[in-house]
Amino acid sequence: MSEAAVSDPLWVQLAYLVAAILFILALKGLSSPKTARQGVLAGAVGALLAVVVLFFSGIELKNLALILIFLAVGSIVGLVAARRVKMTAMPQLVALFNGVGGGAAALIAVVEYFEVGSSDLLFLIFTVATVIIGSVAFTGSIVTFLKLQELMTSRPVVIPAGRWVTILVAVATIVVGVWLVVDPQDWLLVALLILSSIFGVLFVLPVGGADVPIVISLLNAMTGLAVAASGYVLGNLLLLIAGTLVGASGTVLTNMMAKAMGRPLTSTLFGAFNGSTAGSTAAGSDRPVRSATPNDVAIMLGYANKVILVPGYGLAVAQAQSTLRELADLLTEKGIEVDYAIHPVAGRMPGHMNVLLAEASVPYEQLKEMDEINPEFSSTDVVLVVGANDVVNPAARTDKTAPIYGMPILNVDAAQQVVFLKRSMRPGFAGIENEILFDPKTSLLFGDAKETLTKVVASLKTV
């Protein structure tokens, strides 16, 4: 424990304890859609308390005017971004916010190094750790943002001799870090910052679009570890606690996501170097398919006994969650059993579909996770897939060259009839074709999901 943390007044330490408890309650609340709002509020109150306490803790604050100005600017930017962001762009926003956290931790460590000096061994070790982990989280998060925003290809990007270049940069980063601890020199710290940032880019480039949600979770864990390390550098106990909580929860979530994808994390991160993410292309999308009208779909649904709704990213794009809920309510009124099938990686980030459907006040009891819902598809009359693709693609079971091979999927192909709501025959985020679309029992309803669902609802009322 650093002297700064020990010398804090008792009331400051108690306030930090309360903030830490609020952070723990926030994580607990976020574990369920029912309590997610309360969890977010608890975390926000904890963060506000920590910031306010710092100003009155008796610590000498240099450049107070600049601190207040940038605090105001950051608060305004964050508030505007959070209020204006579309649900479809939420993963990108999370990636950016996560990157900012990692970058801030790295820069704080650099500034503290130049301010305090380099006489303490543990201080140097934690400074090096903060710079490396924070820089990787920052640049890696920027790349995930570019992939999710489709400002660059979502496919794996492998530069010439990419494996060896990545290994070389990683080794150089470690060597410079050790050198800095043994023989502190200013230029080594700058070199460490640059090398770590380059490694962050190389680390994420080979990851394909379907695996980006896992990387977001991993980078979030890394940001937490960077913040925890910066807590030691600054002598701030609360940063140490908060960073550890984020790092631990992010690590657990990353492990869960990797299991949901059905392959080791190493395969997700480095599979492209082995050529395992090649996959099939969208060639053959001109093959004949069975199309349907809104009235056709309404008749299928109206005469079914059991219907399962499978939401995906396309539902978020069309902002059709409320219309889908209206359809589900109408089917329930007609005595038809209705459930929502939620894949762990549906959308572009963990929990994306849960948040989206919570917006539409969909009863939590109707949301069923993959393991619970999969046995029910074989006894289901109609499955309505709204904007999902990769999470229902049988290529995950049959095509060893597919980037999603090994990923557990929703077994919609076991149902009696399948209806896909799609804008076009364009493949999903993984960039591969879905054979279910060409199955004789599959009907395709083309168009904007909100518009087509509205027409289906109108037709269903007359069935």
Image (cartoon, helix red, strand yellow):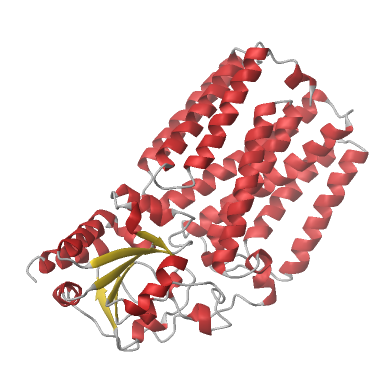
Q: Is residue 87 left or right of residue 447?
A: right
Q: Along the line of sight, which residue is nearer the eye, 287 or 319?
A: 319
On screen, residue 416 above or below 313: below
Q: Quadrant of residue 311?
A: bottom left
Residue at left offset 45%, top offset 71%: 390
Seen at 69% across and 49% down, the residue is 197
Task: Identify the residue at image location x=29%, y=85%.
Answer: 441
Q: Is residue 138 in view from this perspective? A: no
Looking at the image, the residue that sits furthest to the left is 462
Q: Nearer the viewer, residue 117 or 437?
A: 437
175, above or below 71, in the image: below
**Quadrant location of the C terminus?**
bottom left
**Hey, which residue is sitting farthest right in the picture?**
183
Q: Relative to 382, is 160 on the left or the right?
A: right
Choose between 269 and 68: the one closer to the eye. Answer: 269
**The N terminus: image quadrant:** top right
Image position, residue 416 (x, y; %): 30, 82
Q: Position of residue 257 (x, y in %)?
A: 56, 60
